[in-house]
Amino acid sequence: MKIHQNPRHWASKKALTTPGIRNVTRYALVKMHTRIFLGKTAERNHEARRDHLDSFFDGTMDSYVAALESGYTEAEAREITHVQANFDFFNHGWTEMMEIPGDELESHYRRYESFFERHGITIDDPLGEFVPVDGVEPAPKTPEKLDTPEYENAIAGFDDDVYVETADGETVVGGETDEPMDVDPQQAPGVGDEESSKGAS
């Protein structure tokens, strides 16, 4: 998968792993991701899917931190959460929200198989043990879209590794960029001003 990485992502990592500010960052990141992915579907679907996405992304915050604690890079940990989201979107037939085509789901799963197996995550059960205490809110499915999928927002061909596009526009294979020495958690969503929650995922 091809993802972006800029100072705000490093700030979010710092904030999510720092007691005292992690909760406000978690909330802001959940809302930000819900907003971003709702932007990929028709407005008529927004309210029906909003609570589901909020609760689902709340679970992925825990998988992100667990991946970091398991030794994955920031980019890999974040990609893991995006792979989980794409499993969920596929299961719901929300093909227009997917970042990768359906025929690449298996290869993405295999790349992180050891982590997924350890935490009970499968394509059919995208959160595994990271389901929030209150569960994930249900939402209407559109399985008919899987019959003739278009994946209009998906980018194919990046299923063999994590590809990171840096703030300078350089694409790095493997997510091996160095964490800046002067990471400021105030740049993370929810910690600084409201504009800080308007970045890309």
Image (tube, grey):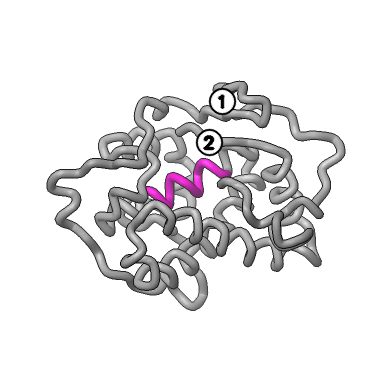
Return the mark for residue 174.
Answer: 1
Judge whether 98 appears above or below 171 on screen.
below
Which mark lies nearer to you, 1 or 2? 2
Q: Residue furthest bottom?
A: 134
Residue type at mark 1: give it: Gly
Q: Residue at x 56, y 64 (%)?
A: 31
| SS of the residue under disc 2 | strand
Label 1 vs label 2: CA separation? 11 Å
| Residue 190 lies in quadrant | bottom right
Q: Residue at x 37, y 67 (%)?
A: 49
Judge whether 14 appears above or below 100 on screen.
below
Return the mark for residue 159.
Answer: none
Q: Residue at x 66, y 47 (%)?
A: 69
Q: Earlier in the sequence, mark 1 or mark 2?
A: 2
Q: Position of residue 134 (x, y in %)?
A: 48, 78
Residue tagged 2:
3
Left or right placement of residue 184 versus residue 64 in this view:
right
Q: Residue furthest front?
A: 43
Magenta range is: 78-86
Q: Position of residue 88 (x, y in %)?
A: 35, 55
Q: Position of residue 183 (x, y in %)?
A: 82, 42
Q: Residue at x 36, y 46 (%)?
A: 98
Judge whether 156 appears above or below 120 on screen.
above
> What secondary structure predominates along the stretch shown in magenta?
helix
Q: Position of residue 97 (x, y in %)?
A: 36, 50
